[in-house]
Image (cartoon, rainbow, N blue to C red):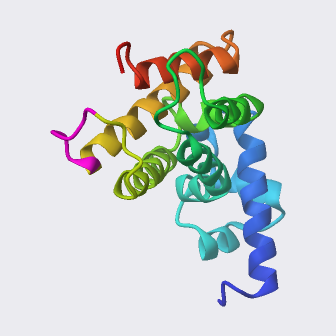
């Protein structure tokens, strides 16, 4: 099968849409290949031509969201004042708020390990690239840049998961500010 064939692209798009649609109805762990195939209007064999399992499909379906989160995180001015979350961070949490059901499904206990890993890895890579370009906050010279980037990526992923799963009553701007204050401790 040629992955660039228009039919293959349409089938993958249909499968991605189906799994995201189903994810708004039930836990990811409860979504079967049969349910995805039926919703996408294909058979199970066609599913397996494109994806090995539901988790791989879900991670692929959320790739655009991962890129959106990573882009917003990469745009944050890391030296902005502590008392006001940078606009890209506020935008990031507004994006997540608009897709909270999907993020909760992907990051919950029955979520997608591949998605969680992909989100953390992409955030780490974006931050590490910024650090390499000289945009690293001061005061961390005794910590390797990769470790620093991984720490921040893990923290952001954890805050996002906590918010969409346990604290949905908190407005996105407030979560962005709380994260920023953790990122920029007092005295920095």
Instruction: Please state the horizontal and vertical placement of residue 72, each as a whole percent of the image.
Output: 62, 44
Q: Mostly what secondary structure, the magenta segment?
A: loop
Q: Magenta includes 132?
A: no
- Between 67 and 10, which is closer to the camera in this rendering? 67
Residue placed farthest to the left in the image? 142
Q: Quadrant of residue 22?
A: top right
Residue placed farthest to the right in the image? 41
Taking the image as drawn, is residue 101 in sight? no
Residue placed farthest to the top in the image? 169
Direction from residue 151 to residue 101 in the image, left or right: right
Disc tally is: 0
Taking the image as drawn, is residue 58 in sight? yes
Q: Quadrant of residue 57?
A: bottom right
Residue at x 58% of width, y 46% of height: 75
Q: Is residue 107 above or below residue 184?
A: below
Instruction: Please state the horizontal and vertical placement of residue 136, each as a whole percent of the image.
Output: 37, 44
Q: Quadrant of residue 150?
A: top left
Residue at x 66% of width, y 73% of height: 45
Instruction: Please state the horizontal and vertical placement of residue 137, each as a whole percent of the image.
Output: 36, 37
Q: Is residue 1 above or below residue 83?
A: below
The magenta span reads 139-145
- Between 11 and 135, which is closer to the camera in this rendering? 135
- Between 37 and 116, which is closer to the camera in this rendering? 116
Instruction: Please state the horizontal and vertical placement of residue 133, each as a whole percent of the image.
Output: 40, 58
Indicate the quadrant containing the C terminus: top left, top right, bottom left or bottom right.
top left
Direction from residue 148 to residue 30 in the image, left or right: right
Indicate the quadrant containing the N terminus: top left, top right, bottom left or bottom right.
bottom right
Direction from residue 32 to residue 156 in the image, left or right: left
Q: Magenta includes 144?
A: yes
Residue at x 68% of width, y 21% of height: 172
Direction from residue 130 to residue 56 in the image, left or right: right
């Amino acid at each position: 099968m040629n992955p660039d064939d228009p039919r293959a692209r349409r089938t993958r798009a249909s499968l991605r849409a189906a799994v995201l649609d189903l994810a708004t109805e039930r836990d990811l762990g409860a979504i079967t290949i049969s349910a995805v195939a039926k919703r996408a209007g294909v058979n199970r064999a066609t599913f397996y031509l494109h994806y090995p399992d539901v988790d791989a499909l879900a991670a692929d379906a959320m790739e655009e969201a991962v890129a959106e989160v990573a882009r917003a995180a990469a745009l944050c001015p890391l030296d902005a004042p502590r008392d006001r979350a940078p606009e890209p961070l506020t935008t990031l949490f507004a994006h997540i708020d608009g897709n909270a059901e999907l993020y909760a499904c992907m990051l919950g206990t029955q979520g997608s390990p591949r998605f969680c890993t992909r989100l953390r890895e992409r955030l780490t890579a974006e931050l590490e690239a910024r650090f390499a370009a000289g945009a690293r906050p001061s005061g961390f010279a005794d910590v390797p840049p990769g470790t620093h980037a991984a720490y921040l990526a893990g923290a952001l992923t954890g805050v996002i998961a906590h918010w969409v799963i346990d604290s949905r009553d908190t407005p996105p701007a407030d979560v962005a500010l709380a994260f920023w204050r953790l990122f920029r401790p007092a005295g920095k």
